[in-house]
Image (cartoon, rainbow, N blue to C red):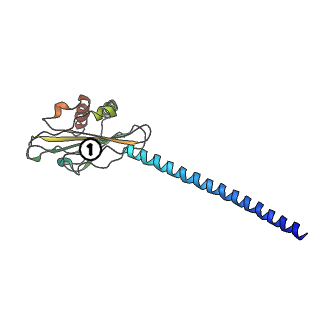
Amino acid sequence: MALGSGLWARGSEAAFLRATSSKTSRAESSMRTLAISAVLIATVAAMAEAQSRPADTVLPPVFMGAVRPVEPPGQPGAWVLQVISRGGFEGRRSGDLIVRSDGTATLITPGDGTTSIHPETLTSLGQRIRTMTTPHWTTVDSRLGICSDCTATLIVLTVRELNGLVHTHTAFWDATTKAAMPRDLLRIHDLALTIQR
């Protein structure tokens, strides 16, 4: 009887160890799956964030510190346009402008102030901005000439794409390089400037 009980006890112990080992393996497997999932989610999030950041555009020193970190409104297709001017004869400039797709405009200099945009101007500006898709921006040949008396102009367009990612496009020129700018881009600039008048 003692021999039988000893075998039964060892058999029960082995069965218990097998069951415990099986539970441990399942728990380890679940932990591994969770860890892999977390790594994949972090990788996808990092890729999405990298796509949402603007390409490292090197701005001329005259524009350093001029660009404001402004997010477009939350809905897909929303945008923020910044028009910045620097330099020119005796440093004269008409003032910087921030225009949002929600219809608000902010004059930065001289003297801060908010102004409203005529609905027709906003509609026209929005249509022109939509025609300037990402491929148009990648071909823009931004550069300044050697004219020290010329006003330098910078346009910064930040757009919330349909997938929710935010992309920023920049272009800059002066009187000697303006002819190289796409006509659609110059129309956006000229239309935005009518808001300041």
Q: Residue furthest right?
A: 1
Q: Which quadrant of the view contains residue 74?
A: top left
Q: Which quadrant of the view contains residue 143?
A: top left
Residue in the foreground of this view, choosing between 97 and 65: 65
Residue in the foreground of this view, choosing between 140 and 104: 140
Type of amino acid at the residue the image marks with label 1 = Thr
Residue 186 is left or right of residue 12, and the answer is: left
In the rendered image, the quadrant that contains the N terminus is: bottom right
Q: Residue furthest front?
A: 3
Residue found 15% across the figure and 35% down from its top: 177
Q: Residue furthest bottom?
A: 2
Residue 160 is left or right of residue 178, and the answer is: right
- Percent from the top left, x then y, of residue 125? 30, 33
Residue 192 is left or right of residue 11, and the answer is: left
Residue found 11% across the figure and 47% down from its top: 91
Number of callouts: 1
In the rendered image, the quadrant that contains the C terminus is: top left
Residue 176 is left or right of residue 49, and the answer is: left
Question: Callout 1: few (<14), some (14-19), or many (20+) C-alpha neighbours within 10 Å?
Answer: few
Which residue corresponds to mark 1? 57
